[in-house]
Image (spheres, rainbow, N blue to C red):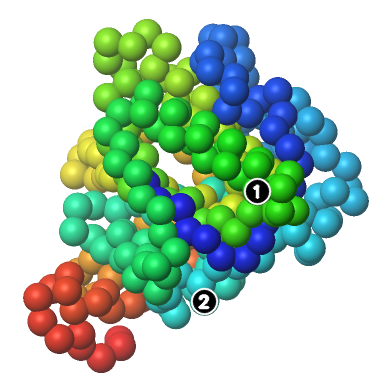
């Protein structure tokens, strides 16, 4: 997991649903969240948005961070949107980490990395991040952190779902709430990667199931055939699903020089 410093972010201070709430949601709360097929004007912490707030959120507050891959940025309408959670999913070796890697290489001197190997360590790191963001806001009027990357979210969440943790799905929803609150309160772009699992009959689908499906604001699936990658929009707050773009991944992925653009 890494955080990137850039333009100052803004937003409200920590709410009652922030990182200091260490307990997972109760089962009835979990079911309500999982039954939300589409975003509503009420966020996961019970706050209602009026029309003016929604308009301001779309037109004023959010900016785009370029990924470093021109075709992906064009497909997404500018890149990774600040204040939102973007998921990139795809099979192994499909190229789903390329937007992440391209963005990281452009700002290597401004990256803070943390090694996280389980869900409990993730909660601790996210708590420390919010404390830092809040201190920067109070003392400096805002934070220079503009991007949070978790690679991969599925490797941290999959072991607790259906395993020895009876509250695994509630913990997953807790992570979702925390990430989306961080994105909104501090105007961060949150980028997570997810792997694919079998959907039967030879088909594949993003991991973490229906409960996670409604969480990201944007879901982008990357597939690869030979040396050409295809990015497909599965979900987007502003754009129609099904839009695609093709790009050639950097040469390091294939062990040779990059071919020309398709």
Q: Which residue is mark 2?
A: 74
Locate the C terminus and report the quarter of the image it occupies. bottom left
* In the displayed structure image, the side of residue 196 where residue 237 appears, left or right: right
Residue farthest toward the bottom in the current orientation of the protein: 260
In x, y percent, where is residue 161?
34, 21
Q: Is residue 244 visible?
A: no
Residue 156's disc number:
none
Q: Write down the quadrant of residue 88 in the picture.
A: bottom left
Q: Using a 10 Å C-alpha cutoff, classify the residue at mark 1 as few (fewer than 14 neighbours), some (14 to 19) or many (20 or more).
A: some
Q: Is residue 197 visible?
A: yes
Q: Earlier in the sequence, mark 1 or mark 2?
A: 2
Element type at mark 2: helix
In x, y percent, where is residue 184?
67, 46
Q: Using a 10 Å C-alpha cutoff, classify the residue at mark 2 as few (fewer than 14 neighbours), some (14 to 19) or many (20 or more).
A: few
Question: In percent of the image, x 33 and y 11: which residue is there?
Answer: 165
In x, y percent, where is residue 190?
51, 50
Q: Which residue is mark 1?
A: 136
224 vs 170, nearest the viewer: 170
Element type at mark 1: helix
Q: Are marks 1 and 2 in contact (CB under 8 Å)?
A: no
Q: Write down the quadrant of residue 40 in the picture.
A: top right
Question: In percent of the image, x 65 and y 42: which residue is there?
Answer: 135
31 vs 82, nearest the viewer: 82
Give me the C-alpha separation between circle 1 and circle 2: 32 Å
In x, y percent, where is residue 203?
24, 45
Q: Write down the quadrant of residue 146 in the picture.
A: bottom right
Question: In percent of the image, x 23 and y 52: which residue is there?
Answer: 91
């Amino acid at each position: 997991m890494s955080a990137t410093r850039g333009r100052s972010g803004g937003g409200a201070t920590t709410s009652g649903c922030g990182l200091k709430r260490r307990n997972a949601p109760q089962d009835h709360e979990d079911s309500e969240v999982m039954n939300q097929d589409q975003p509503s004007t009420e966020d996961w912490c019970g706050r209602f948005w009026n029309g003016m707030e929604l308009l301001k959120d779309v037109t004023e507050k959010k900016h785009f961070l370029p990924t470093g891959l021109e075709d992906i940025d064009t497909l997404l309408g500018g890149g990774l949107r600040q204040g939102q959670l973007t998921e990139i999913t795809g099979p192994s070796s499909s190229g789903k980490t390329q937007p992440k890697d391209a963005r990281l290489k452009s700002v290597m001197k401004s990256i803070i990395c943390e090694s996280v190997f389980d869900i409990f360590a993730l909660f601790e790191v996210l708590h420390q991040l919010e404390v830092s963001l809040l201190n920067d806001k109070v003392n400096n009027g805002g934070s220079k952190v503009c991007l949070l990357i978790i690679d991969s979210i599925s490797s941290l969440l999959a072991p607790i779902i259906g395993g020895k943790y009876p509250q695994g799905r509630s913990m997953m929803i807790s992570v979702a709430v925390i990430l989306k609150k961080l994105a909104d309160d501090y105007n961060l772009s949150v980028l997570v990667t997810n792997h694919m699992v079998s959907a039967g009959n030879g088909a594949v689908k993003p991991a973490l199931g229906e409960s996670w499906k409604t969480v990201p604001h944007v879901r982008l699936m990357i597939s690869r055939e030979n040396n050409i990658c295809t990015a497909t929009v599965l979900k987007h707050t502003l754009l129609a699903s099904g839009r695609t773009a093709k790009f050639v991944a950097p040469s390091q992925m294939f062990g040779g020089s990059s071919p020309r653009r398709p």
